[in-house]
Amino acid sequence: MSVRTTTRPPAQRQARAVRLGPRSVAALALVSAVGVAGFGWPFLAPPTSRLSAHAQDAPWLFAGVLVLLVAVVAAAISESGLGPKAVAMLGVLAATGAALRPIGAGTAGIEPMFFLMVLSGRVLGPGFGFVLGSVTMFASALLTGGVGPWLPFQMLAMGWFAMGAGLLPGPDRLRGRAELAMLAGYGFLAAFAYGTVMNMAGWPFMSALASNVAFEPHAPVASNLARFAAYCLATSLGWDLGRAVVTVVLTLALGPAVLRALRRATRRAAFETPVTFDAPRQ
């Protein structure tokens, strides 16, 4: 009498549209470091610095620098293997995200594009996620006429948002309700984080004479932190909560179908399969 044992086949490694190389990782680290400085300079620069003395000019300077750096990162990631199939998928997802964004524009922060960024970054990886987030925000700005000094900050923040989804654990093994719960939780927190960092980009433009929650260049860091917290509570809490709730609801409701579709498209695209050419027949 023999006992038959079955073993579960090892999980197949999930294909990535873009595999980040050392150059891409270095470019991402550089643009992220400059982005942190661009968003958080009111808390990083001492009150006596020249940067604080030019509070109204600094966001414009960082916006110009970020445009160049985001372009450098996109180019570096492209050199890492963003082939024609990945470009085609990038175009489709970016166009879909750009079309979804105006649906809830101006309505309590209802922005359905965020859940698509989370799911796409999860399936296609952090490199593709960063490019997708940046390109989608740029395309949606052209579609809605929202081009301004805030756009580079939106592109970087959305790139971080989608890239973070690609860095979540268990891309090859975690499936089902556990994965949906993780993605919904990430989307909820990242929606608030996105709103907070975007507040940091626009907050220094406010005049301290117009409001007691505006940035004060000569105030200590603790005072400006309290002003910024009050500014977020007074101006964007409702929008961030609406964005977070919509992201969670759409992730739980549509997530299984969208994840299956993205993974099926990724398998069929065979991004990591090397292209070979047969020798001509004699």
Image: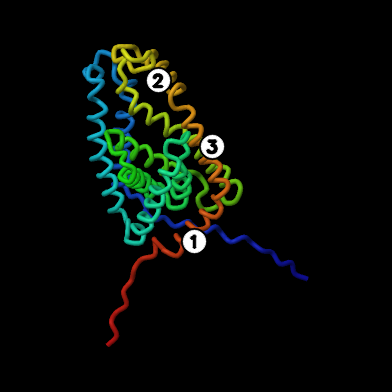
Find residue 245 and name its label: 3
> In what element is the residue under mark 3?
helix
Residue situated in front as seen by the camera: 230 or 108: 108
Instruction: Report whether 9 appears left or right of 88.
Output: right
**Vertical arrangement, residue 122 with respect to residue 155, above or below:** below
Instruction: Look at the image and tell me in which quarter the N terminus lies.
Output: bottom right
Alpha carbon distance from label 1 to label 3: 28 Å
Please name which of the two marks, 3 or 2, marks the residue nearer to the observer. 3
Q: Earlier in the sequence, mark 1 or mark 3?
A: 3
**Vertical arrangement, residue 268 with respect to residue 225, above or below:** below
Instruction: Look at the image and tell me in which quarter the C terminus lies.
Output: bottom left
Mark 2 neighbour density, 10 Å: few (under 14) some (14–19) many (20 or more): many
Find residue 251 and name its label: none
Position in image of residue 86 (x %, y %): 36, 58
Residue situated in front as seen by the camera: 78 or 196: 196
Alpha carbon distance from label 3 to label 2: 23 Å
Mark 1 neighbour density, 10 Å: few (under 14) some (14–19) many (20 or more): few
Instruction: Report whether 45 appears left or right of 235.
Output: left
Alpha carbon distance from label 2 to label 1: 44 Å
Amino acid type, mark 2: Phe
The reply to whether discs 3 and 2 touch (Cβ–Cβ < 8 Å) is no
Find residue 264 and name its label: 1
| Residue found at the far bottom of this picture | 282
Q: Name the residue carrying label 2.
A: 228
Q: Earlier in the sequence, mark 3 or mark 2?
A: 2
Position in image of residue 140 (x %, y %): 35, 45
